[in-house]
Image (cartoon, rainbow, N blue to C red):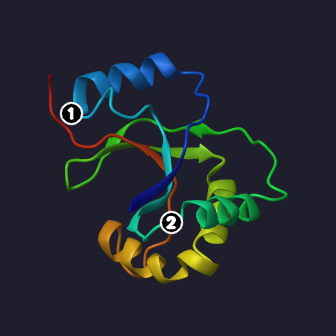
Amino acid sequence: MEFAIVAFPVIECADLVASVRRRFDPLDGLLPPHVTIVFPFSEPAVEQTLERHVADAIVGVSPFDIKLARPTSAEDNYIFMELSEGADRFALVHDRLYSGMLARHRSSALVARLSPAAAFSPHAQGRGIRRR
């Protein structure tokens, strides 16, 4: 089964994010604005174990505020908004989640999404840039 772990933050500028996504994101409407914490991975029949792993990873992490920076695009036509506040908290949860049962997926996620040497940079992302 394919899994990913995402957070759906409450965004004060939700109208702005929605308008950017409506205009540029071909997958707008399929998934609300989110921050991907664990990139897609395949794992056979582990739903309950994964739920426990997530619960353990967030122990002691209290709710926190985030601030989004201006939209930007990457070379591969992805549009995203980096976090100007709260990125360190997402990075903590990201690191905790990529331990234990998900440790073996960490390097493949970095290779596929960033590069082996790149650090996790939390951001709200659109799928691809395309004008509507």
Residue that numbered label 2 is attached to: 120
The quarter of the displayed image where residue 116 is located: bottom left
Tell me the CA gap for discs 2 and 1. 24 Å
Up/down of 132 relative to 30, above or below: above
Q: Secondary structure at mark 1?
A: loop
Task: Give residue 26's position: percent from left, percent from top.
Answer: 21, 33
The residue lying at 85 percent from left, 57 percent from top is: 60
Q: Secondary structure at mark 2?
A: loop
Residue that numbered label 1 is attached to: 26
Q: Are marks 2 and 1 in contact (CB under 8 Å)?
A: no
Q: Mark 2 is on which residue type?
A: Phe
Up/down of 8 relative to 88, above or below: above
Does residue 25 appear left or right of residue 96 in this picture?
Answer: left
In the image, which disc is placed on residue 15?
A: none
Does residue 130 appear left or right of residue 127 in this picture?
Answer: left
Crowding at label 2, few (<14), some or many (≥20) Cα neighbours within 10 Å?
Answer: some
Q: Nearer the viewer, residue 54 or 22?
A: 54
Task: Give residue 69's position: percent from left, percent from top.
Answer: 50, 38
Which circle, 2 or 1, is nearer the viewer? 1
Q: Nearer the viewer, residue 80 or 100?
A: 100
